[in-house]
Image (tube, rainbow, N blue to C red):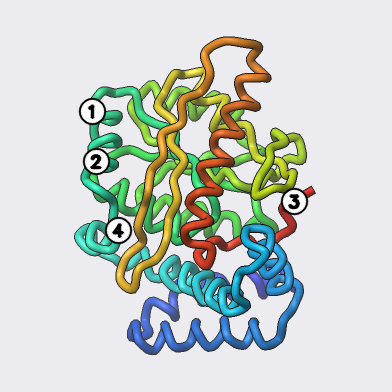
C-alpha cells in the first residue's frame, strides 16, 4: 500500500504541478520547504550538519535557503517535460569558453565525462545538453518501488537522454558508457555520494568520505575528457561551471583512479563552497 501511494504521489506531482501557474507552484513549494525547516526533521538536521562541515561558521539561514533550493529542484523537475527546446536553452547559463569545450568534444567524436555533485538542477542541465542536439547518457539508481523507478526513467527519457540502470541491466554500466563515449555521447554522472559502499575514499571538506569510482575509471579507460561540474541557481536559470580534470597517466590503475577521484572531490568542494545553499545533500556523507 505504501509503495502504491508513493507511486501515485510522484505521478500526481508530474501532472498537477505542470498545470499550476508558475507563481502559485513556486509559492507552494517554498511553503513546503519552510515547513520542513520549522519541523526540523532528520533530513533538515542532516543538511545542517553537512553545511557545517562545508563551513563551520555558515549562517543558519543557509539551511532554510538549502531546503528552498531543493524544493525548487523538484518544482522544476516536475515542470521540465512541458518545456520547449528554447525554454531549455534560455533556462540554462554557461560561459562561452565552457560551452566551446563541450561543443569541441562532441564535434571531435570523443564525447566527455561530466561528473556532478547533487547541486542545482541536474535534470535542467541534461535538458540543455539535449536541446543543443548532443547525445547524452546517464545512470539511474534502481529505486523502490519499481514503478517509481520506471517513472523516473520515462521522465528522463522524455527529456531526451538515454538511461542505463545501475543494477539489473543486461550489461555492465561501465561497458555501455564506454561504448557511448566512443560514439561521441556526453556521459553525465552524479559523483559526490557512493551508493555501492565500495567507492574510493577521499578527503572532502576536511573529512573522509567515499565517492564512486565510475567517472575516473571511464576517463582513464577511454581517455575521454573529464570535467567536474558545479550547478547553481540564479532567479531565472541553472548555471554551470566546468572544471577540467586531468587524470595521472602513470602508476597502477587503482592509484590513478584514487588520485582522479580526489581531484573530482576537490573540484566539487570548490563549487559547493561558492554556492553551499544549492547543494542538496540531505543524507549522511562523511565516514
Q: Is residue 165 rendered to the left or right of residue 125?
A: right
The answer, for residue 282, to whether it is visible in the render is: no
For mark 3, give the secondary structure.
loop
How many neighbours does mark 1 have within 10 angstroms: few (below 14), some (14-19), or many (20 or more)?
A: few
Cα separation, mark 4 vs mark 1, equals 21 Å
Report the residue that reaches farthest toward the right: 287
Q: Position of residue 120 (x, y in %)?
A: 46, 61
Alpha-carbon span between mark 4 and mark 3: 31 Å
Question: Which quarter of the figure is the N terminus placed in?
Answer: bottom right
Give me the C-alpha separation between circle 2 and circle 4: 15 Å
Mark 3 packing: few (<14 Cα in 10 Å), some, or many (20+)? Answer: some
User: Mark 2 or mark 1, which has the lower sequence index?
Assistant: 2
Give how far apart the Cα atoms at labels 3 and 2 are. Answer: 34 Å
Asked if the residue at tag 4 contacts the one at tag 2, i.e. Cβ–Cβ closer than 8 Å, the answer is no
Q: Identify the residue position indicated by label 4 in the image.
A: 92
Q: Quadrant of residue 6?
A: bottom right
Q: Secondary structure at mark 1?
A: helix
Amino acid at each position: 500500500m505504501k509503495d502504491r501511494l508513493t507511486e501515485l504521489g510522484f505521478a500526481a506531482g508530474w501532472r498537477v504541478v505542470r498545470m499550476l501557474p508558475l507563481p502559485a507552484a513556486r509559492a507552494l513549494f517554498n511553503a513546503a520547504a519552510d515547513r520542513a525547516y520549522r519541523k526540523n526533521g532528520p533530513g533538515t538536521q542532516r543538511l545542517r550538519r553537512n553545511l557545517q562541515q562545508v563551513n563551520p561558521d555558515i549562517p543558519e539561514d543557509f539551511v532554510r535557503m538549502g531546503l528552498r533550493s531543493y524544493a525548487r529542484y523538484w518544482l522544476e523537475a516536475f515542470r521540465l517535460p512541458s518545456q520547449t527546446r528554447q525554454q531549455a536553452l534560455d533556462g540554462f547559463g554557461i560561459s562561452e569558453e565552457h560551452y566551446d569545450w563541450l561543443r569541441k568534444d562532441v564535434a571531435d567524436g570523443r564525447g566527455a565525462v561530466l561528473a556532478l555533485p547533487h547541486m542545482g538542477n541536474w535534470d535542467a542541465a541534461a535538458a540543455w545538453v539535449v536541446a543543443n542536439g548532443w547525445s547524452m547518457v546517464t545512470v539511474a539508481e534502481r529505486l523502490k518501488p519499481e514503478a517509481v523507478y520506471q517513472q523516473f526513467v520515462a521522465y528522463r527519457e522524455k527529456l531526451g537522454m538515454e538511461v542505463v540502470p545501475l543494477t539489473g541491466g543486461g550489461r555492465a554500466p561501465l561497458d555501455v558508457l564506454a561504448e557511448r563515449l566512443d560514439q561521441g555521447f556526453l556521459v553525465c554522472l552524479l559523483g559526490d555520494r557512493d551508493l555501492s559502499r565500495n567507492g574510493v575514499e577521499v578527503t572532502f571538506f576536511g573529512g573522509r568520505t567515499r565517492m564512486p569510482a565510475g567517472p575516473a575509471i571511464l576517463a582513464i579507460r577511454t581517455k575521454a575528457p573529464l570535467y567536474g561540474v558545479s550547478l547553481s541557481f540564479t532567479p531565472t536559470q541553472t548555471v554551470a561551471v566546468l572544471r577540467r580534470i586531468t587524470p595521472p597517466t602513470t602508476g597502477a590503475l587503482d592509484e590513478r583512479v584514487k588520485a582522479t577521484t580526489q581531484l573530482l572531490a576537490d573540484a566539487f568542494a570548490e563549487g559547493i563552497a561558492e554556492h553551499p545553499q544549492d547543494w542538496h545533500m540531505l543524507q549522511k556523507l562523511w565516514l
